[in-house]
Image (spheres, rainbow, N blue to C red):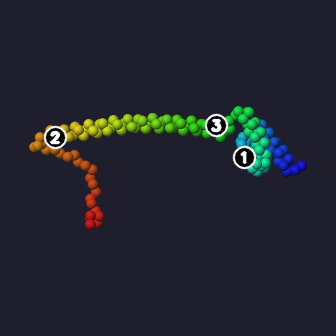
């Protein structure tokens, strides 16, 4: 037998093993990479020399209508990411609403503070509240 015919037979046998769930040399994934590994041929043999067998393999996979494990994992991840995005949007909306409320409160307090200072009697003593202590200035910096 010629090498090409031997390759085709090995590929067909590998297709059968993978599709029946009894892989011997690969992880059994429904991919060209796993098929090439199972048949012990280079991957480009399937994509360049035997594309008809590659197409037959993918046609069988589609007929079985079972999404690959990687596809299921990615679909779950997409759902989680959409949930995270929705939660992020909700939190951002709440933060924006909080910000607006805080701006209104600060504005109101500023107005009240001005009014109190204006209405204070000129002889009234206003006491400043203590502030946080500041570290002493470094004389070397001042020079």
Per the image, label 1 sits on a secondary structure element best described as helix
The answer to whether 136 is drawn above or below residue 70 in the figure is below
- N-terminal-most mark, 1 or 2: 1
The answer to whether 48 is drawn above or below residue 70 in the figure is below
Residue extending farthest right = 1
Please name whichever residue, 138 or 90, is drawn nearer the observer in this view of the structure.
90
Find disc 1 in the rendering and name its residue.
Answer: 33
**Is disc 1 in contact with disc 3, using a CB cutoff of under 8 Å?**
no
The answer to whether 62 is drawn above or below residue 1 in the figure is above
Q: Which mark is residue 45?
A: none
Disc 1 and disc 3: Cα gap in Å? 18 Å
- N-terminal-most mark, 2 or 3: 3
Location of the C terminus (image quadrant) = bottom left
> What residue appears at the point 17 percent right and 41 percent down from the top-left corner?
117
Q: Residues within 10 Å of mark 3 (few under 14, many from 20)?
A: few
Per the image, label 2 sits on a secondary structure element best described as helix
Asked if residue 72 lies left or right of residue 107, the reply is right
Q: Residue 41 at x, y = what percent?
A: 78, 49
Per the image, label 3 sits on a secondary structure element best described as helix
Q: Residue 142 at x, y = what percent?
A: 26, 64
> What residue appears at the point 24 percent right and 40 percent down from the top-left corner?
110
Residue 59: quarter of image: top right
Find disc 2 in the rendering and name its residue.
Answer: 118
Find disc 3 in the rendering and name its residue.
Answer: 72
> What residue appears at the point 77 percent right and 37 percent down from the top-left corner?
20
Disc 1 and disc 2: Cα gap in Å? 81 Å
Q: Residues within 10 Å of mark 2 (few under 14, many from 20)?
A: few
Please name whichever residue, 120 or 96, is drawn nearer the observer in this view of the structure.
96
Asked if residue 67 lies left or right of residue 6, the reply is left
Q: Residue 53 at x, y = what percent?
A: 78, 42
């Amino acid at each position: 037998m010629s090498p090409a015919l031997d390759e085709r037979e090995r590929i067909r046998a590998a297709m059968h093993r993978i599709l029946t769930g009894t892989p011997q040399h690969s992880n059994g994934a429904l991919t060209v990479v796993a098929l090439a590994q199972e048949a012990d041929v280079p991957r480009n043999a399937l994509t360049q020399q035997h594309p008809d067998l590659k197409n037959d393999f993918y046609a069988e996979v589609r007929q079985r209508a079972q999404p690959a494990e990687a596809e299921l994992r990615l679909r779950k991840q997409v759902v989680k990411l959409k949930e995270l995005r929705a939660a992020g949007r909700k939190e951002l909306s709440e933060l924006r609403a909080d910000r607006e409320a805080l701006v209104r409160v600060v504005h109101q307090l500023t107005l009240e503070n001005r009014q109190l200072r204006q209405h204070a009697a000129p002889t009234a003593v206003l006491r400043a509240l203590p502030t946080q202590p500041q570290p002493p200035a470094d004389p070397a910096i001042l020079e």
